[in-house]
């Protein structure tokens, strides 16, 4: 997955633009651990896999930048449980 996410540190969220709309994940960083607090896609993008693309991009970034993830949001938690290939990223 090669979607480029933007780290909007001011708003503490990762953002992925799809078809002119922003899918985002609100986070809290604590050292080398990122707590994913909420994942949201605009209504027109729901059910299209947009949030899945965002989570893949966040997981790829976590792997590349060597930080761990704590999924506090129900969607992020379920996504990480389904994608066993990212289990080493869990804090």
Image: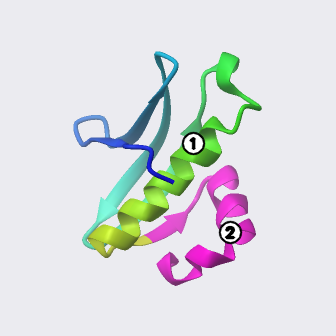
Q: Image check: 16 left or right of 48?
A: left
**SS type, badge 2:** loop
Q: Position of residue 17 (x, y in %)?
A: 44, 28
Q: Which residue is mark 2?
A: 83
As measured in the structure, the alpha-carbon distance from the residue carrying label 1 to the one carrying label 2 is 16 Å
Residue 39 is marked as 1
Q: Residue at x 37, y 43 (%)?
A: 4
Q: Residue at x 64, y 66 (%)?
A: 80
Task: Using a 10 Å C-alpha cutoff, classify the residue at mark 1 as few (fewer than 14 neighbours), some (14 to 19) or many (20 or more).
Answer: many
**SS type, badge 1:** strand
Q: Position of residue 56 (x, y in %)?
A: 54, 55
Q: Position of residue 16 (x, y in %)?
A: 44, 35
| Position of 85 relative to 47 (above/below) | below
How many numbered marks does the figure carry?
2
The mark that comes first in sequence, 1 or 2, is: 1
Q: Image check: 40 left or right of 89?
A: right
Q: Find out whether residue 80 is within the magenta segment.
A: yes
Q: Image check: 56 left or right of 6?
A: right
Q: Residue at x 68, y 69 (%)?
A: 83
Q: Find out whether residue 17 is within the magenta segment.
A: no
Q: Position of residue 67 (x, y in %)?
A: 34, 73
Residue 69 is marked as none
Q: Nearer the viewer, residue 30 or 90?
A: 90
**What segment carries the magenta color?**
69-91
Q: Image check: 81 left or right of 19?
A: right
- Magenta portion: prevailing SS class: helix
Let me know if residue 16 appears in the view.
yes
| Residue at the front extreme of this rendering | 2
Q: Residue at x 59, y 34 (%)?
A: 40
Let me know if residue 91 appears in the view.
no
| Position of 17 relative to 75 (above/below) | above
């Amino acid at each position: 997955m090669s979607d480029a996410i933007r780290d909007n540190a001011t708003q503490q969220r990762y953002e992925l633009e799809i078809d002119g709309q922003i899918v985002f994940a609100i986070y809290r960083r604590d050292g080398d651990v990122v707590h994913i607090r909420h994942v949201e896609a605009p209504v027109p993008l729901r059910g299209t896999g947009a949030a899945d693309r965002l989570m893949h991009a966040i997981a790829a970034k976590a792997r590349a930048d060597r930080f761990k993830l704590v999924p506090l949001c129900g969607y992020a938690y379920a996504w990480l449980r389904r994608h066993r290939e990212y289990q080493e990223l869990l804090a």
